[in-house]
Amino acid sequence: MNIVMIDDSYAFDGATSGIRALGGAEKAFAYLAGALAARGHEVTAINRCEYQASVDGVLWLPFETPRPPECDVLIAFRKPELLDEIDDPTAKSILWLWGQPKILNEPVNQKLLEKHDPALVFVGEHHRQAWKSWRDFQEVVIVPGIADSFVETEPGDAPPPVAVVTTHPLHGLRHILRLWRESIHPKNDKAELHIYSASLFNGAVNERLKDIAEAVTSAQAINVIIKSPVSDSEMAAAYSSARVHFYPVIGTEYYGSTLAESQACGTPAVIYVGEGKTDIIKECIGNGQTGYIAPDDDAFANLALELLAEDTAMYQSLSRDAKTLQAGRNWQSAAIEFEALWK
């Protein structure tokens, strides 16, 4: 099939995640393109890349490039207006959603959906349930795949007592730092907390990040280390060398990319709920099997301490199940499910 995928975010292509850090949504776009090409399709990916390139069988074109005159399948990523980018009424239209689906009920987007009648792809069941349609559309849940870098990484038998955090500094990091300072570090002064954040690592923080940046800097004395997000292979190595992934619930998130990746590496998770809801997180981890959703601050600290302790029994059990249960979701599986939309 002749497949055109289109995204309107920022510059990247299929090689980017092997070189530097890339957002979860952008990685998903690139990996699906590569997986479809590997399955024999002719795939053109249009986005904000600077130059035309061929990567893993995918032709990457800058957004300003003239559109292909025809295609069999159009996959528009995130933005309904991208459905208008290909003028071929015979093409199968797919809108792959990632964020808040309620945007579909805005009048301008309702008109686009009525015009193109696309199949709507959601990243999880709760993502799909977050939208109430005014009429019937083809709706399907396709859980994103996980890159081979993470799937193929094996966890260590007994990694050092390291916890990692990967979410944006404004998404619960202050609470995790407080628990580290007050309840975790005083009982295990050998443990380290590694915070992967480009903005904090580079020091180029805006006014919104000023307070949390100062809090992180002051916490360096209690084994809090700021690290730069890196390529997929390097992040896979970081996850497999850690005992636990601290992950705060994010109210605007429908799929936790870094959580899925760390689970595939066999890294147990401890979820900080705060005032958030756990429905979506429960789609990402097996509570009590591959990690824990901590019901309160004391539980979070106690679970963290047990996973960071010299006795690695809890780590070994959770890590084994995380690797077994979560590493089977690769991009080839996701590509097959996308193919079902036009077969």
Image: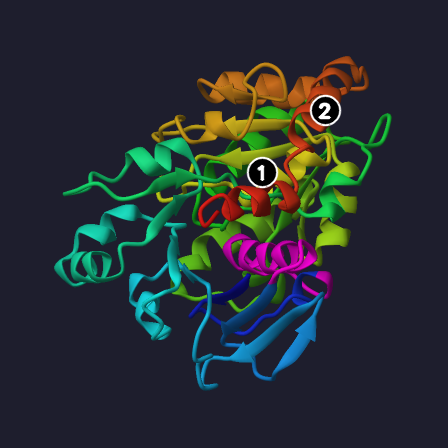
Nearest the viewer among 271 and 16 is 16
Q: Is residue 69 magenta?
A: no
In this rendering, would 90 be left or right of 285? left
Work out whether 31 lies above or below 281: below
Identify the residue position indicated by label 1 in the image: 259
* Foreground of the two, 228 or 157: 157
Residue at (73% x, 36% y) in the render: 265
**Tag in front: 1 or 2:** 2
**Mark 2 secondary-structure assignment:** helix
- Relative height, residue 6 to residue 328 (above, below): below
Q: Quadrant of residue 8?
A: bottom left
Q: Position of residue 297 (x, y in %)?
A: 47, 22
- How far from the left and from the top, in percent, is residue 58? 64, 68
Give amino acid for label 2: Thr
| Type of secondary structure dominating the magenta stretch | helix
Q: Secondary structure at mark 1?
A: helix
> Callout 2 environment at 10 Å: few (<14), some (14 to 19), or many (20+)?
some
Q: Nearer the viewer, residue 66 or 204?
A: 66
Q: Position of residue 146 (x, y in %)?
A: 64, 43
Q: Residue at x 32, y 43 (%)?
A: 138
Mark 1 residue crowding within 10 angstroms, few (<14) / some (14–19) / many (20+): many
Question: Residue 324 shows which numbered tag?
Answer: 2
Q: CA distance from mark 1 to mark 2?
A: 15 Å
Image-quadrant location for residue 155? top right
Which residues lie in the magenta part? 18-41
Pointer 1 or 2: first along the chain: 1
Vertical arrangement, residue 84 with respect to residue 76, above or below: below
Q: Nearer the viewer, residue 208 or 113?
A: 113
Q: Are marks 1 and 2 in contact (CB under 8 Å)?
A: no
Is 340 situated left or right of 304 in this image?
Answer: left
Which label number is shown at residue 326? none
